[in-house]
Protein backbone atom coordinates (compact mmCIF):
# COMPACT_ATOMS: atom_id res chain seq x y z
CA UNK A 1 0.00 0.00 0.00
CA UNK A 2 2.86 2.40 0.80
CA UNK A 3 4.28 1.90 -2.71
CA UNK A 4 0.87 2.64 -4.21
CA UNK A 5 0.53 5.84 -2.14
CA UNK A 6 4.05 6.92 -3.03
CA UNK A 7 3.38 6.31 -6.72
CA UNK A 8 0.09 8.24 -6.49
CA UNK A 9 1.84 11.13 -4.74
CA UNK A 10 4.59 11.17 -7.36
CA UNK A 11 2.08 11.16 -10.21
CA UNK A 12 0.09 13.96 -8.55
CA UNK A 13 3.20 16.07 -8.02
CA UNK A 14 4.41 15.45 -11.56
CA UNK A 15 1.05 16.56 -12.96
CA UNK A 16 0.94 19.80 -10.94
CA UNK A 17 1.95 22.93 -12.82
CA UNK A 18 5.26 24.37 -11.77
CA UNK A 19 5.16 28.13 -11.43
CA UNK A 20 8.86 28.79 -11.74
CA UNK A 21 10.45 32.19 -12.18
CA UNK A 22 9.42 33.32 -15.65
CA UNK A 23 13.00 34.34 -16.37
CA UNK A 24 13.81 30.65 -16.67
CA UNK A 25 14.44 28.57 -19.77
CA UNK A 26 12.95 29.94 -22.96
CA UNK A 27 12.12 33.44 -21.72
CA UNK A 28 12.71 36.46 -23.91
CA UNK A 29 15.31 38.96 -22.73
CA UNK A 30 12.61 41.08 -21.04
CA UNK A 31 11.19 38.04 -19.21
CA UNK A 32 8.29 37.43 -21.59
CA UNK A 33 7.85 34.12 -23.37
CA UNK A 34 8.92 34.30 -27.03
CA UNK A 35 6.04 34.04 -29.49
CA UNK A 36 6.38 31.38 -32.17
CA UNK A 37 7.17 32.99 -35.51
CA UNK A 38 3.99 33.69 -37.45
CA UNK A 39 1.66 32.95 -34.52
CA UNK A 40 -1.76 34.58 -34.72
CA UNK A 41 -5.09 34.59 -32.90
CA UNK A 42 -8.44 35.62 -34.28
CA UNK A 43 -12.13 35.65 -33.48
CA UNK A 44 -13.94 33.11 -35.66
CA UNK A 45 -17.43 34.24 -34.66
CA UNK A 46 -19.22 36.54 -34.45
CA UNK A 47 -17.98 38.53 -37.43
CA UNK A 48 -17.12 42.19 -37.05
CA UNK A 49 -20.20 44.33 -37.68
CA UNK A 50 -22.63 41.60 -36.60
CA UNK A 51 -25.75 42.39 -34.62
CA UNK A 52 -26.39 39.62 -32.08
CA UNK A 53 -28.62 38.84 -29.14
CA UNK A 54 -27.80 37.25 -25.81
CA UNK A 55 -26.38 34.83 -25.06
CA UNK A 56 -23.44 35.57 -27.36
CA UNK A 57 -21.11 32.71 -28.34
CA UNK A 58 -17.59 33.86 -29.18
CA UNK A 59 -15.29 31.33 -30.88
CA UNK A 60 -11.52 31.73 -30.79
CA UNK A 61 -8.97 30.66 -33.37
CA UNK A 62 -5.20 30.32 -33.32
CA UNK A 63 -2.58 29.49 -35.91
CA UNK A 64 1.12 28.90 -35.50
CA UNK A 65 0.71 28.39 -31.75
CA UNK A 66 -0.79 25.60 -29.68
CA UNK A 67 -3.37 26.09 -26.97
CA UNK A 68 -2.50 24.76 -23.51
CA UNK A 69 -3.91 25.43 -20.05
CA UNK A 70 -2.38 28.11 -17.85
CA UNK A 71 0.44 26.78 -15.70
CA UNK A 72 1.58 24.32 -18.36
CA UNK A 73 5.09 25.01 -19.64
CA UNK A 74 5.08 23.65 -23.18
CA UNK A 75 7.08 25.57 -25.79
CA UNK A 76 5.03 27.11 -28.59
CA UNK A 77 1.78 27.26 -26.60
CA UNK A 78 -0.40 29.73 -24.73
CA UNK A 79 -4.02 30.30 -23.77
CA UNK A 80 -6.65 32.81 -24.82
CA UNK A 81 -7.72 35.99 -23.04
CA UNK A 82 -10.78 37.83 -24.33
CA UNK A 83 -10.60 41.58 -23.89
CA UNK A 84 -13.99 43.30 -23.96
CA UNK A 85 -14.06 47.05 -24.58
CA UNK A 86 -10.37 47.37 -23.69
CA UNK A 87 -8.12 49.85 -25.49
CA UNK A 88 -5.13 47.74 -26.64
CA UNK A 89 -2.82 50.71 -25.96
CA UNK A 90 -3.76 50.48 -22.28
CA UNK A 91 -2.69 46.84 -21.87
CA UNK A 92 0.57 46.39 -19.95
CA UNK A 93 2.20 43.66 -22.02
CA UNK A 94 4.89 43.04 -19.38
CA UNK A 95 2.50 42.02 -16.62
CA UNK A 96 0.04 39.20 -16.07
CA UNK A 97 -3.33 40.22 -17.44
CA UNK A 98 -5.95 41.14 -14.85
CA UNK A 99 -8.97 38.88 -14.45
CA UNK A 100 -12.23 40.83 -14.48
CA UNK A 101 -15.32 41.38 -16.63
CA UNK A 102 -13.23 43.13 -19.31
CA UNK A 103 -10.30 40.68 -19.23
CA UNK A 104 -11.67 37.12 -19.45
CA UNK A 105 -9.17 34.33 -18.88
CA UNK A 106 -9.45 30.94 -20.54
CA UNK A 107 -6.70 29.22 -18.59
CA UNK A 108 -8.29 25.81 -19.11
CA UNK A 109 -7.41 26.01 -22.80
CA UNK A 110 -10.98 26.84 -23.86
CA UNK A 111 -11.56 28.05 -27.41
CA UNK A 112 -15.04 29.51 -27.05
CA UNK A 113 -17.33 31.14 -24.53
CA UNK A 114 -21.03 31.90 -24.31
CA UNK A 115 -21.89 34.94 -22.24
CA UNK A 116 -24.39 37.73 -21.77
CA UNK A 117 -23.23 41.20 -22.75
CA UNK A 118 -25.09 44.44 -22.03
CA UNK A 119 -27.06 45.87 -24.96
CA UNK A 120 -24.92 48.17 -27.11
CA UNK A 121 -21.72 48.13 -29.11
CA UNK A 122 -18.75 46.09 -27.90
CA UNK A 123 -15.16 45.74 -29.09
CA UNK A 124 -13.76 42.23 -28.70
CA UNK A 125 -10.11 41.25 -28.99
CA UNK A 126 -8.08 38.14 -28.19
CA UNK A 127 -4.67 38.25 -26.58
CA UNK A 128 -2.65 35.07 -26.07
CA UNK A 129 -0.98 34.64 -22.70
CA UNK A 130 1.78 32.32 -21.59
CA UNK A 131 1.62 29.91 -18.66
CA UNK A 132 1.67 32.91 -16.29
CA UNK A 133 -1.04 34.94 -18.17
CA UNK A 134 1.67 37.29 -19.50
CA UNK A 135 1.47 38.21 -23.20
CA UNK A 136 4.17 36.72 -25.43
CA UNK A 137 7.00 38.72 -27.01
CA UNK A 138 5.88 40.01 -29.43
CA UNK A 139 2.25 40.05 -28.30
CA UNK A 140 -0.11 37.70 -30.16
CA UNK A 141 -3.18 39.90 -30.46
CA UNK A 142 -6.21 39.63 -32.74
CA UNK A 143 -7.86 42.31 -34.79
CA UNK A 144 -10.68 44.08 -32.95
CA UNK A 145 -14.12 42.70 -33.74
CA UNK A 146 -16.98 45.16 -33.14
CA UNK A 147 -20.43 43.73 -32.47
CA UNK A 148 -23.78 45.19 -31.45
CA UNK A 149 -25.86 43.38 -28.86
CA UNK A 150 -29.62 43.98 -29.07
Image (cartoon, rainbow, N blue to C red):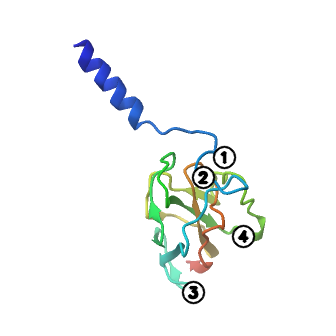
C-alpha span from label 3 to label 4: 19 Å
| Place of residue 9 in the rendered image (x, y in percent of width and height, measured from the top left) | 35, 24
Residue lying at 63% horizontally and 74% vertically, measured from the top left: 122
Residue lying at 66% horizontally and 57% vertically, measured from the top left: 28
**Mark 2 — residue?**
133
| Place of residue 20 in the rendered image (x, y in percent of width and height, measured from the top left) | 59, 39
**Mark 1 — residue?**
23
**Of the pair 125 and 13, the residue shown nearer to us:** 13
**Mark 3 — residue?**
49
Residue 26, above or below 13 = below
From the viewer's perspective, tell me whether residue 73 is left or right of residue 12: right
Q: Dots 1 and 4: beta carbons under 8 Å?
A: no
Which of the two discs, 3 and 4, labels the residue nearer the N terminus? 3
Which of the two discs, 1 and 4, labels the residue nearer the N terminus? 1
C-alpha span from label 4 to label 2: 16 Å
Q: Secondary structure at mark 3?
A: loop
**Mark 4 — residue?**
88
Amino acid sequence: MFKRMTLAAAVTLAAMPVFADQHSHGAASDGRTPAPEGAAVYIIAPESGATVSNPVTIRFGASGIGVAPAGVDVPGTGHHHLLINVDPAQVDLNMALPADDQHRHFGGGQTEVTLDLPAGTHNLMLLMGDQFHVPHEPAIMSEIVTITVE
